Amino acid sequence: MKNKVQPKVTLVGAGPGDPDLLTIKGAKALAEAHVVLYDALANEELLSFAPNKALKIFVGKRKGCHAYTQDQINQLIVDNALTYGHVVRLKGGDPFIFGRGSEEIEYVESFGIPTFVVPGISSSIAVPASQGISLTKRGVSESFWVITGTTSARKLSKDVALAAQSTATVVVLMGMGKLDEIVAIFQSESKGEIPVAIIQNGTTPQEKVGIGTINTIQEVVAENKLSSPAIIVIGEVVGDSKKRKGFYKELRSNQNKVLVYGK
């Protein structure tokens, strides 16, 4: 008699892009998967940790191109768990940082299916760190904000305006399409000279970096042809990082000249 399938779902954070930044626990979960549902921001090299016979299903979403709606993804997780057993839901970064991971877990649990969560290394912290940018630093920044650049209503989060009033480091995810609005908000707070870094495809071989100030970052983006997926980091810690001090020293001594930096 055929053994009854034991459904289970493990939500795994894939990390910021570099496959070596997957956690050991995440790799172990993948090794036991019967099905892997993976996102666009999850490095496909991570699928090698799953058994060859495991089903691998791409359910990624990019701007203007969705393989599946969120409701369809939720149902796919449940259907595959009930049919095959252990489903690993592989999501970029950490699944609970703007990853809708909690929504997926709640949906799965409504069917009585056991769920487990393996946290991932969030791109909001790891990508700046890979460029030598410490989001907090004694005497420079006492805290940091991590904000979505685009809400579910496709608007810029109102928290950006609040963060612009603080002295904290501000990290904006999914914000490239709202860069003009972000710049205008910080300029309205008389913070045109605050350092900014934009890091595209962080921690991967395709990484591109542009640095400047609030007043110059739009030109930097155009010059370096930067686009999504990218992280925007705003704050004095950008200029204080060891890699950037020389650049910002020169920038501030050439106020009438726009300097552009690319990796």
Image (spheres, rainbow, N blue to C red):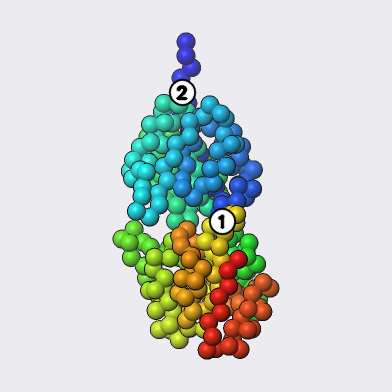
Q: Indicate whether 146 appears above or below 65.
A: below
Please tell me whether residue 147 is drawn above or below residue 41 in the rendered image.
Answer: below
Dot 2: what SS?
loop
Between disc 2 and disc 1, whose residue precedes?
Answer: 2
Residue 177 can be seen in this image:
yes
The image shows residue 26, relative to residue 155, as above or below, that is: above
Residue 225: percent from left, percent from top: 48, 66
Left or right, 10 with respect to 60, comes to: right
Q: CA distance from mark 2 to mark 1?
A: 41 Å
Q: Amino acid at mark 2?
A: Val
Q: Residue at x 63, y 61 (%)?
A: 130
Evaluate if marks 2 and 1 touch, with contact meaning CB atoms under 8 Å apart: no
**10 Å crowding of disc 1: few (<14), some (14-19), many (20+):** few
- Number of numbered discs on residues: 2
Classify residue 169 by image quadrant.
bottom right
Q: In the rendered image, which residue does mark 1 sit on? A: 206
Q: Which mark is residue 88?
A: none
- For disc 2, the neighbor class at 10 Å (few under 14, some 14 to 19, many from 20) is few
Question: Which residue is drawn at the image coordinates 50% and 43% (left, top)?
Answer: 90
Residue placed most toward the observer, 12 or 253: 253
- Give the labeled residue for mark 2: 5
- Residue at x-position 39% and y-position 73%: 180
Residue 240 visible in image: no
Q: Secondary structure at mark 1?
A: loop
Query: Can you name the residue that lies furthest to the left here?
Result: 153
